[in-house]
Amino acid sequence: MAGIYVHIPFCKRRCLYCDFFSTTMLGRQKEYIEALLKEIAARRNETGEPIRTIYLGGGTPSTLESADISRLLQAIVTADATEVTMEMNAGDADTAYLQAIRQAGVNRLSIGIQSFQDELLRQIGRRHTAAQAAEAVHMAQEAGFDNISIDLIYALPSQRTEQWQADIETALDLGIQHISCYGLMYEEGTALTKMLETGQITAIDEDTENAMYDYLCERLKAAGFVHYEVSNFALPGYEAQHNSSYWNGTPYIGIGAGAHSYTRKDGEAVRSWNPDDLDAYIQGINNGTLVRGNERLTERDLFNEQVMLGLRTSHGCTLPPSVSRRATVGYYKELDLLSEPEEGHIIATQKGLHVLNRIIEDLMEG
């Protein structure tokens, strides 16, 4: 099985916290779509395996017309795909549009909501309201979608614990199948980071952020959700197939400006990426001169990725034996940060998830 990710970089406006490659030049969508179609045609069979998952991400894919979504999916050929996900801004939800993309082949929606508190939405630059967020989910359900994920963010500036708890309850009341929750990251160069640096906002303290995360995990577990990755929770059977491919080493092709790919050929694992520049991408595709960055992954690289990605999941990872590594694992087990259900197979505990980056760094090979 393999997957295809298609990057749609267009946004009506940028969120203040986002550092993904995006542009507000909506007038260039049509020429970008044509470039995407050419790249899809050239690379569709690159993995040598059937395409089982498709993910339209961004940016904001829902800024595209439904006819363009249909063209992209027809070009990929969705017959073998079991999961076709499309990201959507809650402010773009419209019954006719939702019905059209579902007919085009989208069978899973990922709706960017982030919060059900209007004051927090305004603070981070979201263009939808709390009421629109809930209505977007209702409209998607009425359009026939029965596999819906939403994104939420916690540890927002000035966010109160009771607001976060209320957001979780609102999400559960909507009857969705999947929730992705992320602690706010102050990425270099973003507008929100500049606000933090100039004292316009104050970051939530670490203890409060950890308490918000622990409450999230406990509440969703009580509601029947499986915590299958650090930031992802699903009702049984609704785990994101495409995103899981990133964590378990499944090959995937990244289409579009800034998109990354991971392929295996002749025993070699290769990671490659398109330039995150709209002009360079479109001109390169049209002229046949597109230069992709790439790197061949060594055995050490693959091991480090196995540790980094495996420990993010509920499955954990298996480590080859070594004296120094056993000592590191033993140390973290004593602190109740790692568990070891079988010798050499480790899983991060709930407590360990708070310091996961430190654990991973200590276990990786330098």
Image: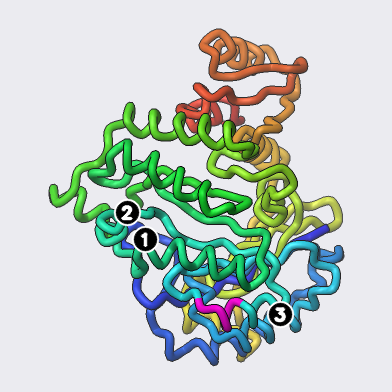
Q: Could you tell which of marks 1 and 3 lies nearer the N-terminus? A: 3
Question: Residue 115: horizontal and vertical position, in percent?
Answer: 38, 53
Whether residue 233 is visible here, answered yes or no, is yes
Identify the image quadrant of the C terminus: top right
Task: Tell me if label 2 and label 1 are in contact, CB under 8 Å.
Answer: yes
The residue depicted at 77 percent of the width and 17 percent of the height is 342
Is the residue marked by circle 1 packed among few (<14), some (14-19), or many (20+) residues within 10 Å?
A: many
Magenta range is 94-98
Q: Nearer the viewer, residue 83 or 203?
A: 83
The disc at residue 103 is 3
The residue depicted at 65 percent of the width and 25 percent of the height is 347
What residue did someone put label 2 on? 117
The residue depicted at 27 percent of the width and 38 percent of the height is 204
Q: Could you tell which of marks 2 and 1 lies nearer the N-terminus? A: 2
Three-letter amino acid code of the residue under disc 3: Gln
Q: Secondary structure at mark 2?
A: loop
Q: How is the image coloured?
A: rainbow
What residue did someone put label 1 on? 130
Q: Secondary structure at mark 3?
A: helix
Q: Could you tell which of marks 3 and 2 lies nearer the N-terminus? A: 3
Residue 68 lies in quadrant: bottom right
The disc at residue 115 is none
The residue depicted at 55 percent of the width and 11 percent of the height is 331
- The chief SS type of the magenta part is helix
Three-letter amino acid code of the residue under disc 2: Gln
Q: Is 345 positioned to the left or the right of 93 in the image?
A: right
Question: Residue 254: horizontal and vertical position, in percent?
Answer: 65, 67
Question: Residue 162: horizontal and vertical position, in percent?
Answer: 32, 38
